């Protein structure tokens, strides 16, 4: 694990965007993308840059079950607003939150990933160490599946919704197995509320209790964290 400590998310987002642009230059064709507040600065940098994704493919990590693509809180909409509207890809995939047949949807998404092997996967980090929506206890070899969200994730995400009851309780998420297959990984985390998860990820034992700790088993992983997120290392 290559760990880079930066001052804040502005500096870290710029660094992550540089890595993406470098990967494009080096011929990467498929980018695995993440949502949440963490990658916002990275997307701002990419939008302001001259990077051209128009012949490339993106595959997103996850989507809330039950939210239509145009819902304000859907990850689909997040991607449109933060990146795709300004920097479109030739093809962008996000799980379909409205799919009611979970088996069909996860099979469809797994085929997309198999057909478009991910060159560089961007990741955020949940306060409980989750990656994508792979909550503690998730199997390490899983592909895309429908997952229940833990109460801690529901609480953490409630700030984006009017009422806690509105926060979806399930998501479609790439599994840890799918994430681990990508050739390169860049994980970002900012703020003190991520410090325990960062410590578990970097210094803790590799355990399903902290899903991100599995990244210790991989080469080609860059972790970009700010000083607050690094404060317990
Ligand atoms: C969410 C997402 C993750 C994200 C994480 C952290 O629930 N499913 O992909 O990395 O939690 O979110 P944030 O970046 O807003 O702190």
Image (spheres, grey):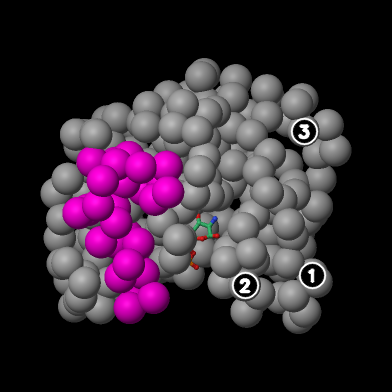
Q: CA distance from mark 2 to mark 1?
A: 11 Å
Q: Earlier in the sequence, mark 1 or mark 3?
A: 3
Quadrant assignment for the N terminus: top left
Q: CA distance from mark 2 to mark 3?
A: 24 Å
Q: Which mark is residue 102?
A: 3
Q: Main secondary structure of the magenta part?
A: helix
From the viewer's perspective, tell me whether residue 124 is left or right of residue 145.
left
Q: CA distance from mark 1 to mark 3?
A: 20 Å
Q: Which mark is residue 155?
A: 2
Tags 2 and 3 touching, CB below 8 Å: no
In percent of width and height, residue 14 lies at 26, 66
Seen in the picture, residue 35 relative to 105 is either above or below; the reply is below
Q: Nearer the viewer, mark 2 or mark 1?
A: 2
The magenta stretch spans residue 201: yes
Q: Earlier in the sequence, mark 2 or mark 1?
A: 2
How many residues crowd around disc 2 within 10 Å: few (fewer than 14), some, or many (20 or more)? few
Under circle 1, the secondary element is helix
The magenta segment is 188-216
Q: Which residue is mark 1?
A: 166
In percent of width and height, residue 195 lies at 30, 70
Under circle 3, the secondary element is helix
Residues 162 and 231: in front is 231
Which residue is found at the position 58% from the left and 64% from the top? 153
Q: Earlier in the sequence, mark 2 or mark 3?
A: 3
Under circle 2, the secondary element is helix
Which residue is found at the position 20% from the left and 75% from the top? 231
Q: Which mark is residue 222?
A: none
The magenta stretch spans residue 228: no
């Amino acid at each position: 694990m290559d760990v880079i400590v930066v001052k804040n998310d502005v500096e870290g987002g710029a660094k992550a965007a540089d890595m993406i642009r470098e990967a494009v230059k080096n011929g990467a064709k498929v980018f695995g993308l993440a949502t949440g507040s963490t990658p916002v600065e990275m997307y701002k940098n990419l939008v302001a840059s001259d990077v051209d994704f128009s012949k490339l493919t993106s595959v997103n990590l996850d989507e809330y079950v039950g939210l239509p693509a145009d819902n304000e809180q859907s990850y689909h909409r997040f991607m449109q607003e933060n990146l795709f509207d300004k920097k479109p890809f030739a093809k962008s995939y996000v799980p379909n939150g409205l799919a009611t047949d979970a088996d069909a949807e996860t099979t469809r998404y797994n085929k997309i990933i198999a057909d478009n092997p991910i060159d560089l996967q961007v990741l955020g980090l949940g306060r409980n160490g989750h990656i994508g929506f792979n909550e503690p206890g998730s199997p390490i070899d899983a592909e895309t599946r429908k997952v229940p969200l833990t109460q801690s994730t529901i609480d953490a995400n409630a700030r984006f919704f009017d009422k806690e009851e509105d926060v979806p309780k399930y998501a479609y998420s790439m599994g840890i197995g799918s994430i681990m297959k990508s050739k390169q990984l860049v994980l970002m985390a900012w703020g003190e509320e991520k410090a325990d998860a960062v410590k578990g990820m970097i210094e803790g034992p590799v355990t399903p209790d902290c899903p991100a700790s599995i990244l210790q088993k991989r080469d080609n992983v860059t972790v970009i964290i700010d000083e607050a997120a690094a404060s317990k290392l």
